[in-house]
Amino acid sequence: MKSFLVLESKPRVYLCRPCPVPEPGNFGIHDAGVKEQIQRLDALAAEMKLGVIDMHAALADQPRLLPDRVHPNAEGAGEMAKAAFAALTGKPAAP
């Protein structure tokens, strides 16, 4: 990330919070671990003055969008795209 922050073009740099993991998780991944990562990522984003795109919130309480309990399906990816659009533009995405 630091390599982007020092570019002459001064790009906006965003960090994405990871997707939720419906219990019981899968592939050794579980939501408790993801929530620990989110705390660390939020601290890093604050320290480095990065924007945050909250993919966790975008898919929270929608386990059907994560059929293997880790990876989003096409509809889940669409919800993630809406979250990114809103974070980048400050405008809500079209339904």
Image: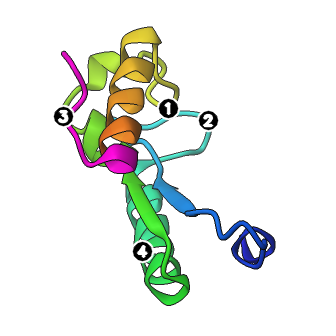
Please give left or right for residue 29 compared with residue 31 in the image.
Answer: right
The color scheme shown is rainbow
Say which quarter of the image contains residue 61.
top left
The answer to whether one can see residue 36 in this image is: yes
Q: Label for residue 61? A: 3
Q: Please tell me whether residue 25 belongs to the stretch shown in magenta.
A: no
**Residue at the disc numbered 2:** 27
Residue type beneath disc 3 = Asp
Sequence-earlier tag: 3 or 1: 3
**Vertically, is 85 above or below 3?**
above
* Mark 2 or 3: the one toward you: 3
Rendered residue at 34%/49% (across/down): 87
Please give left or right for residue 3 compared with residue 50 in the image.
Answer: right
Sequence-earlier tag: 1 or 4: 4
Q: Looking at the image, do the residues carrying marks 4 and 2 touch, with CB atoms under 8 Å apart?
A: no
SS at badge 1: loop
**Residue at the disc numbered 1:** 70
Q: Label for residue 42? A: 4
Q: Residue furthest top?
A: 74
Which of the pair 7/37 is nearer the observer?
Answer: 7
Q: Which residues are magenta?
A: 87-95
